[in-house]
Amino acid sequence: MGEYIIDFSIVAALIIGITALNGVLSNAIGTRIFGRGKQNLHVEQTAKTQAGWKAVGGRKQY
């Protein structure tokens, strides 16, 4: 019974690990291939929206 639990734990860890790795890899590949020119789309749109705003806030901390 102990061997069964060890085998089950190893297989479960492998399945979970491979699934997580597959998700990360497919996301990275999809972003590189299908999102070629859109990588900074949101950053650029935010900069356009905030253009001309007054700078407000506290002191700058370096």
Image: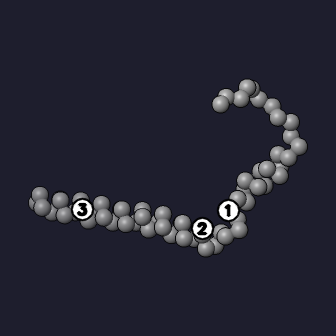
Marks 1 and 2: in contact by CB < 8 Å? Answer: yes
Q: Which residue is mark 1?
A: 39
> Spatial distance from mark 2 to mark 1, Cα to Cα?
8 Å
Marks 1 and 3: in contact by CB < 8 Å? Answer: no
Left or right, 45 with respect to 8, comes to right
Quarter of the rendering containing residue 53? top right
Of pointers 2 and 1, the one earlier in the residue sequence: 2
At a point 88% along the width and 43% down the height, the residue shown is 52
Q: Quadrant of the C terminus?
A: top right
Instruction: Classify mark 1: helix, strand or loop.
Output: loop
Left or right, 30 with respect to 12, comes to right
Q: Which mark is residue 31?
A: 2
**Coloration mode:** one colour
Q: Residues within 10 Å of mark 1 (few under 14, many from 20)?
A: few
Q: Which residue is mark 3?
A: 10
Of pointers 3 and 1, the one earlier in the residue sequence: 3
Going by the numbered disc 3, the residue's amino acid type is Ile
Instruction: Classify mark 3: helix, strand or loop.
Output: helix
Query: In the image, residue 41 lies at what x, y percent?
Result: 73, 60
> Spatial distance from mark 3 to mark 1, Cα to Cα?
38 Å
Q: Nearer the viewer, mark 3 or mark 2?
A: 2
